[in-house]
């Protein structure tokens, strides 16, 4: 089974293919998760410019 991700105008649905469970995410939760991913990647490679861009992008 594959993982599926789709967005509507108000909510996002993330389907966990391994468990077959659907989790409703608000737009803010989806944005926070996306921002956390960027911050994690920046910290992982030690590139402060990527972190700065991620922070500026969220303003």
Image (cartoon, rainbow, N blue to C red):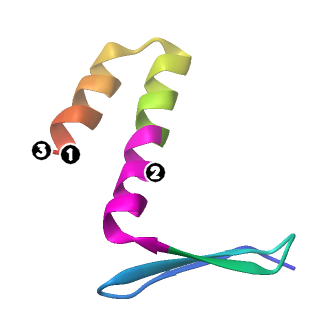
Q: How crowded is mark 2: few (under 14 residues within 10 Å), some or many (20 or more)?
A: few
Q: Which residue is drawn at 80% across and 76% down?
A: 2
Residue 39 falls in which quadrant of the image?
Answer: top left
Main SS category, magenta section? helix
* Residue farthest left in this picture: 59
Dots 2, 1 in contact, CB < 8 A: no
Q: In this view, does 45 lie above or below 20?
A: above
Q: Is residue 28 covered in magenta? A: yes
SS under mark 3: loop
Q: Is residue 33 above or below residue 42?
A: below
Please give the label number shown on residue 33: 2
Q: Name the residue under label 3.
A: 59
Q: How crowded is mark 3: few (under 14 residues within 10 Å), some or many (20 or more)?
A: few
Residues shaded magenta: 25-36
Q: Which residue is drawn at 87% across and 70% down?
A: 18
Mark found first going from the N terminus, 2 or 1:
2
Residue 15 falls in which quadrant of the image?
Answer: bottom right
Mark found first going from the N terminus, 3 or 2:
2
CA distance separating discs 3 and 2? 15 Å
Q: How crowded is mark 1: few (under 14 residues within 10 Å), some or many (20 or more)?
A: few
Residue 28 falls in which quadrant of the image?
Answer: bottom left
Question: Residue 42: x percent and y percent?
Answer: 44, 24
Dots 1, 3 in contact, CB < 8 A: yes
CA distance separating discs 2 and 1? 12 Å
Q: Is residue 53 covered in magenta? A: no
Q: Mark 1 points at which residue?
A: 58
Q: Residue at x 20, y 45 (%)?
A: 58
Camera-nearest residue between 53 and 20: 20
Camera-nearest residue between 31 and 38: 31
Please give the label number shown on residue 13: none
SS under mark 1: loop
CA distance separating discs 1 and 3? 4 Å
């Amino acid at each position: 089974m594959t993982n599926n991700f789709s967005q509507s105008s108000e909510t996002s649905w993330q389907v966990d293919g391994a468990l077959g469970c659907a989790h409703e995410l608000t737009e803010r939760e989806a944005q926070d998760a996306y921002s956390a991913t960027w911050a994690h990647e920046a910290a992982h490679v030690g590139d402060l410019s990527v972190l700065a861009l991620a922070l500026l992008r969220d303003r």
